[in-house]
Amino acid sequence: MTIQWFPGHMAKARREVTEKLKLVDIIFELIDARIPYSSRNPMIDEIIQHKPRLVLLNKADMADREATKAWIRHFADNGIKALAINAQAGEGMKEITAASHEILKEKFDRLRAKGVKPRAIRAMIVGIPNAGKSTLINRLAKKNIAKTGNTPGVTKAQQWIKVGKELELLDTPGILWPKFEDQEVGKKLALTGAIKDTILNLHDLALFGLRFLERNYPGRLKERYQLDEVPEDPVELFDHIGLLRGALGSGGTVDYDKVAELVVREIRMEKFGKLTFEWPEETNEKSENGME
């Protein structure tokens, strides 16, 4: 399964982000707490260069708590402030403004010393599709300003949004990158809903998810699907799940399409509990191997 997704509006969004960069004080980089490495667009570093940045690990309520703590330490070790948030429930919103003031303290102290009156912090929100940018904006603004949706690609244009007197936000469409050098990154993005299902091979995606659970959360996998051991043969594994869950077609045979949809849906709906699909030490290994 080779995954690529780079609609035309994403190329346009990249150009617009570059053009608007000089208008903002700070970048809010929104990533998925379940896949902090895979949901970071490698083009973002190139685009924003040395602009101050605050990393927001959204959907932290769906991620492994210990893994999220490890990621926040990892970013801190690399000189980047990071916060765990849940935009859907509004958790961590106050910390965003406080952290922005902390990061920009020196800049605003210099402006005050020059006699410049205090003004709102201007921030640009960037991130991949379906990371929760519009939900975050609506939470910060305390009203439904930005369009939201549970499918990627809802935001198609930029807009300025005032958040009280302290923040002004520039929303941007989600930007993926033209080619995934590491196909595992593409699979993790797909499994967490960042890529439209209509272009995916759900059989491969479901098997990828099952093998991940087998390696990292074997107890949860066995309990969920009543397995003593996890079969090595994918067909045997799909047959077991299909028969157990009644994912059957005509004649009582297992419908593998239904099984694949069921597995992917249950991973996304937290039926296996809170999951994190990658840890900082794994990404360090990838960097050393020239994958970052």
Image (cartoon, rainbow, N blue to C red):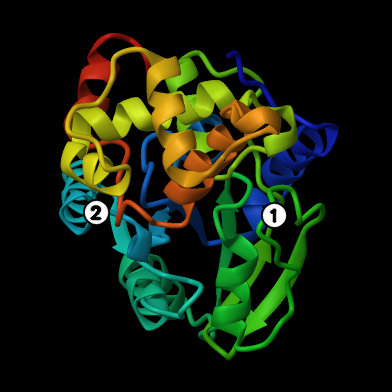
Q: Is residue 39 left or right of residue 194?
A: left
Answer whether residue 51 is visible to the viewer in this image.
Answer: no
Q: Quadrant of residue 165?
A: bottom right
Residue 94 screen position, x and y as percent: 38, 83
The numbered disc on residue 218 is: none
Residue at figure coordinates x 54%, y 41% from the top left: 48
Label 1, residues with CA under 10 Å away: few <14, some 14-19, many ≥20: many
Which residue is the extreme one toward the front?
Answer: 251
* Front one among 82 and 18: 82
To which quarter of the image does residue 36 belong?
Answer: top left
- The residue type indicated by label 2 comes to Asp
What quarter of the picture does the N terminus occupy? top right
- Residue identifier under label 1: 172
Establish if 29 lies above or below 2.
Answer: below
Q: Could you tell me which secondary element the residue under label 2 belongs to?
A: loop
Q: Please, what secondary structure does the residue beneath circle 1 have?
A: loop
Left or right? Give the position of 182 relative to 7: left
Comes first in the chain, label 1 or label 2: 2
Residue hosting label 2: 64
Vertical placement of residue 259 versus 262, above or below: above
Q: Are marks 1 and 2 in contact (CB under 8 Å)?
A: no
The residue closer to the viewer here, 58 or 45, is: 58
Q: Residue at x 77, y 58 (%)?
A: 158
Residue 3 shows up from this direction: yes
Measuring from the top left, give residue 269's x and y in whole percent. Answer: 47, 57
Looking at the picture, which amino acid does disc 1 mark? Answer: Thr
Residue closer to the observer: 188 or 263: 263
